[in-house]
Amino acid sequence: MTLELKNVSLTVGGETHIYPTSLRLADSGFNTLLGTTLSGKTTLMQLMAGLIKPAEGEVWFNDRNVTGVPVQKRNISMVYQQFINYPNLTVYENIASPLRVARVTRSEIDTRVRQMADLMKLGPMLQRKPAELSGGQQQRTAIARALVKDADLVLLDEPLANLDFKLREELRDELPRMFADRHCTVVYATTEPSEALLLGGHTVALHEGRIVEFGPTSRLYRNPATLLAAKVFSEPPINAIPVTKQGARFAIDEASTWDAHDDAAALADGPYVIGLRPHHVSPIANGTSSVAIDGHVLITELSGSESVVHFSRADETWISQSHGIHAIEVGETAKFYFDPSNALLFSPSGERIGGSASGGDA
Amino acid sequence: MARITLDNLRHSYLRAPKSRDDYALKQLNVAWEDGGAYALLGPSGCGKTTLLNIISGLLRPSEGRVWFDDDDVTDLPPDARHIAQVFQFPVVYDTMTVFDNLAFPLRNRGVNETVVKSRVQEIAEMTDLTAMLHQRASGLTADGKQKISLGRGLVREDVNVIMFDEPLTVIDPHLKWQLRSKLKELHHRIQTTMIYVTHDQTEALTFADQVVVMHDGEVVQIGTPVELFERPKHTFVGHFIGSPGMNVLPASVANGAIHFAGIPVDVDNPVDLTAGQTAEIGVRPEFVRFSDDGIAVEINKISDAGRYRVVSASADGHRINLLIGEDQDIPAAGARVAFDATQTRLYADGWLAGEGAGQ
């Protein structure tokens, strides 16, 4: 099951919603569309599903051009943020409904509904109506209905956004397993980088109607090709800090400098940008490779097990996220530390330059 | 501004409640100091909205009293309580300008226009709305509109308390950070009592000095974020706070020795239990590590969370989660795990052993 967008674009009333986009999704894989609200996630899904027709370009499914084929004639399931079930039908009938439409035999419907209910932990709820279920169970019912008909393409548009934190955690953990043995391509939209990471598979980083980067999720997170991709895939926001290379040293300012080794040493002198994830900036010195900086503390957020500190240095705003509770007062000037081997190195225009800001891998 | 005391509150939506289960709020005693930042944290259906409605006066409790300082306000209607509320969805008058939106609560109370002007400008500056004051509210983004709601909540100087009901649920994660920081900063500046209701632990723990955790109509723990993380008084708190939550494993206790799956486990609070009590061991994933000797586990799943990996393992059919740092290794075979004894606790019938049930 492969889905391919070939140079697809969409403009509505003169306004560009999707810039020309080409994308080939992994065969029967789990793919996450990651981006903020209005980055184009839902529109891209509607284009994939055939709910809207692209202005330019083609949509291919299993090496067949399906660009003009309406959604009813394609084997697609969708799950939305709002829990959509038939309120007057039981959970059993809700799950069975696509099979009844497809005129599957009664005994096969029964087998498949019960299998699906077991997978979704809905076995004991089959005779209930949706209103008698928790939010998590309602969304499980909607997902069960999407899966039961063995769709070729399953589109999930922020399916966990309306659920409580803990239910979200539970379903997020279960989701990849639910799709593991099925021969369908899954596309899942989220605004949350942490969710994309935990779901694994492949990630499409989206920004303002453009695909910024597409790749295996862990690789995209650890080795983004651009600063923009790193920004889309960082929560809290990645620290993007201008630095200068001169000779064998990198410098943020006169006091905060470090050696450039290996590949980094061979770079031309001049301005660069480093990308430092907040958890790589700590109020505690860690080893001998730490570079110290002075920060003016703006905000502290202590969550019980970790400290998030927003601070300013020159005209930059930094964020540090560290284990433990660190008593740092708002308004004071404090020392923060980072290891340049954790910093991603970019050109001033945001193109990635090889490994880390000390040479070697980031 | 006021100190808020909830005195033996109970509430049932039924006319003649009989059993304990008939109460949406079972029994509640809470004292909130003037000027504090508090959070009410719990899952859907735990009773937090009922409690919020009782404080704001939309609901009269079946039993108990609500005090603002030394005044019993239990029977006062909402408009006599001087409360500001900010809701999940921005409540904004689209046809009005941002200025008029912010001015609304003041003009409504006949505040003179010179005061309105200076106060609105002050609040606009705090909430980064100054540049948009004369735009129509309809043109603003979701977070812009929620800033107006926040600003309107803050604009009156005579409120006893500002209550926030899931104010960031509809906001994107990258903007949540900014609004959460903003809210914290605003609390520092205006020092009004604030109560923040949410199901999201991150929001509750980062905003509040003290968090009230509710479950099934009851308060299960009141504590600082650190206390809730390090010493959950109930397994529910351990599970609900932390991501993933605390591992809770069945235990047996005999002659002061505590066992899980036949293996002795050291805990921070070794006490003997009374006959018939259910014993469980609670240890957070942060305090489980791989070790050469320890409990043999099977590794079922490894999830990459970026700055750490969540390892889901099992022993004797029970799930044990571990958090493993970016630079630590995960054994390929024959994995064993050990618990940090100072952070491993015994629970009796769900409550921290040796401390008894209740608050």
Image (cartoon, coloured by chain):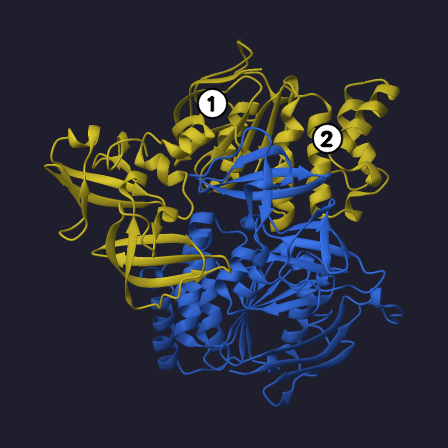
Chain colours: A yellow, B blue
For residue B261, above or below residue B127:
above
Does residue A209 appear in the picture of this structure?
no
Q: Residue at x 35, y 46 (%)?
A: A280
At numbered mark 2, what does the secondary structure look like: helix, strand or loop? Answer: helix
Q: Amino acid at mark 2?
A: Arg
Chain on which label 2 sits: A
Does residue B253 appear in the picture of this structure?
yes
Q: Split into 4 quadrants, where in the image is the C terminus of chain B?
A: bottom right
Q: Residue furthest front?
A: B255
Marker disc for residue A54: 1
Q: Which residue is at the front of the view, B135 or A317?
A: A317
Q: Amino acid at mark 1?
A: Pro
Q: Which residue is at the front of the view, A329 or B183?
A: A329
Q: Residue at x 69, y 44 (%)?
A: A136
Give the x, y percent position of residue A81: 61, 41
Q: Residue at x 61, y 82 (%)?
A: B80
Which comes sooner in the sequence, label 2 or label 1?
1
For residue B66, above or below residue A132:
below
Count of residue discs: 2
Chain on which label 1 sits: A
Give the x, y percent position of residue B98: 41, 63
Q: From the viewer's perspective, tell me whether residue B321 is left or right of residue A355.
A: right
Marker disc for residue A79: none
Q: From the viewer's perspective, tell me whether residue B296 is left or right of residue A310.
A: right
Give the x, y percent position of residue A223: 36, 31
**Spatial distance from mark 2 to mark 1, Cα to Cα?**
28 Å
Q: Quadrant of residue B214?
A: bottom right
At numbered mark 1, what does the secondary structure look like: helix, strand or loop? Answer: loop
Q: From the viewer's perspective, tell me whether residue A248 is left or right of residue A27.
A: left
Marker disc for residue A145: 2
Mark 1 Cα-neighbour bin, 10 Å: few <14, some 14–19, many ≥20: many
Give the x, y percent position of residue B343: 58, 57
